[in-house]
Image (spheres, helix red, strand yellow):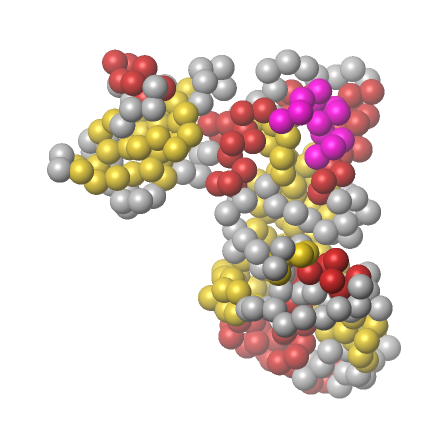
Amino acid sequence: MSNVNGVLVVDKPAGMTSHDCVSRIRRLYGTKKVGHTGTLDPDVTGVLPICLGQATRLVEYLQELPKRYDVVMRIGSSTTTEDASGEVIEQKEVDIASITKERVEELFQSFLGEIDQVPPMYSAVKVNGVRLYDLAREGTVIERQSRKVTIYELTLHDISAGDGVVDVSFTCTCSKGTYMRTLCVDLGRVLGYPAHMKLLRRIKSGPFTEGEAIPLQVLEEQAANGEDLSRHLVSIPQAMSFMPAFQVKPERVRAVRNGLVTALPGVNVEEGSLICLFSENELLGIHRVCRGEKGLFAKAEKVFPSEV
């Protein structure tokens, strides 16, 4: 498959790493330039945008966007990994009557906005050049610096109880780098119980939703039937539609493609933000908005060849 450029929104199955998905997509589409926009743990399912060809240059922008998850938190036990894959390290029978809808929703309200979160030991975060999960597998636990993350939305769906534990189902919209496992542990701690993440599914990543995500198995079946997989790709201009756009006059197109700055008359965006420059429906590049003596102008960050 030649000249493959675009974003493929994959519905990642459980039992596979994000890197495994990338390897399979690389083989299916016959291109070496492939990269994903945000790791999902092997047990986690859902939306995994994968960039192919020239779209790999979008990864740094797409991975910074908010994510949305459907989460099931189990209250009553904690694990080594903070999710259901780990060994149980603490258990406490839950007073079921104390986990009310009103109490959980009040707790959710207190977690909205910017919070401090300590990355779990079983994570890819590096400390002194070493991945935390490598230390954890050796049985080493070290102190981790907390990080600022943002919780934009917490919506309660269901509370179910049985056998001395309570499962709380909710949706969370959050910033890049937020660990749902750790959020479950922290929520449980405030409620007075050990907790862990029982299930997790990503239902949105940046502009991409589960409604447009394609199961990996379906892609492989279509490839085996000789179907054209390029029809599933989201074009680069469409993938960047979340950014403000500016139409370049025809006489300035060549200059923009050569990386020269160009004025932004009539544009009302914040200085320092990013903007996409177009010639009709063709994306010329991603630019940084700067201010000069004559007003706002665009300084090139990424310039795209005409075929994308």
Q: Say which quarter of the image contains residue 141.
A: bottom right
Q: Say which quarter of the image contains residue 55.
A: top right
Q: How many marks?
A: 0
In the image, 28 versus 111, the foreground residue is 28
Would residue 100 be seen by someone viewing this image from the given angle?
no
Residue at coordinates 29% horizontally, 38% vertically from top-left? 289
Q: Main secondary structure of the magenta part?
A: helix
- Any magenta on residue 97? no
In the image, 72 versus 83, the foreground residue is 83
Position in image of residue 73 (x %, y %): 71, 67
Left/right of residue 41 with respect to residue 282 in the rendered view: right
Position in image of residue 183 (x %, y %): 63, 67
Would residue 111 be seen by someone viewing this image from the given angle?
yes
- Any magenta on residue 32? yes
Residue projecting furthest to the left = 293
Position in image of residue 245 (x %, y %): 35, 32
Residue at coordinates 27% horizontally, 44% vertically from top-left? 271
Left/right of residue 91 with respect to residue 245 in the rendered view: right
* First to last magenta residue range: 22-33
- Position above or below: 82 against 177: below
